[in-house]
Image: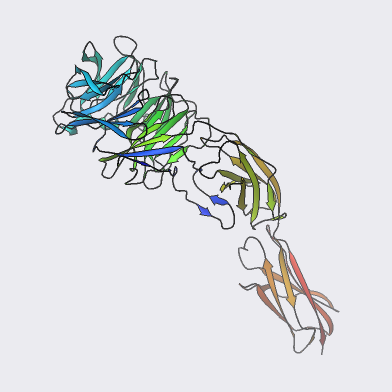
Amino acid sequence: MDTAQRPRRLAATLLAAVLAGTGLTVAAAPAAHAAASDAVAKLPIGSYSGLAVDSVHQRVYIADQRDTNSNGTVLVYDFSGRKVATLQREFGISGVALSEDATTLYVGERGRVITYDTGTLQENGGYGAAYDTCGRQLVFTGDKVWSTSAYVYQSYQCATASTALNMLADGAVNSTGWNDVGRLQLAPGARGQNRLLMGQPKESDAPNPFLASFDVSGTTPVRDASRRFADGDGKGALDLKDMAASADGTKVAVADATAGTRLLNAGDLSDASGQYQALPAGATSTAVAFSGDGTYIARGAQATGSTPDLLVQSADPADGTPPLEFAFEGSLDGNGVAPRGLAWSQDGSRLFAVTRGGTGQEYWLHIIQPPAVQYDTRFTGDLTHSPSSAVAGEPLSVRGRLEWDGPAPAQPLKVTAVREDANGTHQLGTATVKEDGTFTVLDEPDLVGGATYRVSFLGDLTHRPATDVTRAVTVGKAPASITLAGPEEATMSGGVHLTGTFTAQGKALPERATLTVKRTDRLGTGTLSSVTVAADGTFAIDDLPRTRRQVTYTVSWPGDDLHTSATASATVYVSR
C-alpha cells in the first residue's frame, strides 16, 4: 500500500500536567494546531539524493542516491501521495531538477544528464557530462541547468574530493572553472532572479566552510557575495545541510546543523535583522524551504522521540504566530526530515517532506497542506476570577471566553496566561479552550498585593492572534486562626490545663508556628512560656495560677508576609 491518509498529530507531545477540575494545561512548548491533511507514502528506495516538485502536472520527483553497483530510479508521485511511475535507469543516478516552465525533468547519471518530457514521462534527450562518482547535484536557475561533478575511486574520498561547478549548454555539461573541496551543495535563487547559491559542507575538512551567491544571468557565473562564518577563534563555522532563497529574493535561509536556522540578507549574506525562533531543544537542523507564494517557511530537523522534526510557520520572522509542529516517530513516519528533504508547490498549498528512519536507509514522503485561510479571533467580555477575594497561596481561577470566526478548529485552541506582580512576570502555561469558547486558568498567587492576569491567544496558521485581555486582582493574606479550650473552674494547687489548635490557610509555613501565651489576673498581665504547635496543629498549655478568682489566658500569633495574625482567649475561675 503506497499511501496512508489519517489525521496528524502536529506537535511534540506536550510535557504537561492537567490540573484536575479545570481546563488548564501547563506546558513547556507552544500549542500545536491541526493542518488540513497529511498523506504519507513509504518510498521503495534505500537512499535519497533529490526532490523536485512539478506544480503544472502535480507531480513529485524523488531520486535515489548514486550507487555504482545497481540501477538508479526516479520515483514519481502525484499530489495525493500515490506513485504514478518509476523512471528506471541502467546506471546509478543522483540529483533531479525541473525547468522553470515544468516541461523538462533533468536527471543526473555518472557521465550524463538525462532529460524527460514531464507530460509523457518519456526520455527525450541527454547531455554528456564530466564523470561523477560522488553524487551529482542539479539546479535549474537563470534559464540553465547547473551541476556538480567529482571523480574519485572510493566513496569515502568524496568528502574531500575536488568538486567542479558545471553548466549545461550547447548539448553538454561544461565546466565553469569554479571548483572547491567537498560535496558542494547548490540551490536556486528566487524564481526569475538569475541567481545560484553554493555552499561547502563541514565534512569537506575545510576549517571554515563557505556560502556563496552567483549572478548567472550571463554566459558564465559571477560570484557577487560570499561568507565564512567562523570567528577569530575558529568557532561558529558553517555546518551546512540545506539552503533556500525567499520568494522575493531578499533573504536566504540556511539549515545549519550547529547553529539551527540562519536567516541572511541575500545581497551580501549578512545576518538579517530578524531571526526565526530557535528549533526545539535536541533538534538538529537538516532542511529549509520557502513556499513559492512567499507565505510560509518550512524548517526540517532530526530529533528523537516526540521532539518536533518539522516547523511550518510564517516566512516573516517578526510574525509571532506559533508554528505547526510535526514529530515524526518511527515506522509510520520516519525519525526526522532528510537533509535537503523539503520542497513546496508553487502556490504554497502543499509542502513535501522526505523523512528517513530505521538504519537511515528507509524513507517516507509526507504531503502536508497548511491552511490557506486565516480567521479573526477575539476575547469577549471581561475576565472573572474566583474566589472573589484572592488569597496568597490558595487556588485562584481566572475565567474568560475566546471567540473565533470560520469553522470550528480541528484541535482545541489554547490560550497562554501570565501573572504580573511586584516580583515580575510569571508564566502560567496554556489553558485549553472548550467548544463553547470558555477557558479556565488556575493559579496560586504567592505575593500579597496587586496582581494582573494577562491572557493571550497567539494564533495559529488558521486563526489570527487576539488582542490580550487582562484582569487586576488584589491578593490578600491567607487567614490564620486559633481555638483555645480550658476548664470553667480550676484550683491553684491542681493547676490549669488548656488545649487548642492553630490553623494557617494558604501556603504552608516554613516551620511550626510558635505562639505567645499571656495570663491576666487581678494582679496584672504577664507573659508565660511560648508554645510550639505540633505537626497536626494542636498545642497544650499547663499553668499554676498565682491567685484566686478569674484568670484569662490569651494565645496569639503575629502572622507573617502571607498570613494574618490570630488570637484566642479562655477564662478560668480559680479557687484554692
Q: Split into 4 quadrants, where in the image is the N terminus?
A: top left
Left or right of 32: which side holds 566? right
Left or right of 133: which side holds 261? right
| Residue at position x 76%, y 68% in the image | 567
| Residue at position x 69%, y 42% in the image | 381
Left or right of 144: which side holds 445? right
Position above or below: 482 against 215: below
Q: Split into 4 quadrants, where in the image is the C terminus?
A: bottom right
Residue 504 location (% of width, % of height): 67, 65
Snapshot quadrant of residue 260:
top left
Residue 309 location (% of width, % of height): 39, 40
Q: Nearer the viewer, residue 174 or 559?
A: 174
Q: Mark yes or no: residue 134 visible.
A: no
Residue 274 location (% of width, % of height): 49, 28
Q: Mark yes or no: residue 124 visible.
A: yes
Q: Nearer the viewer, residue 517 or 328?
A: 328
Residue 325 location (% of width, % of height): 44, 40
Q: How many marks?
A: 0
Snapshot quadrant of residue 47:
top left
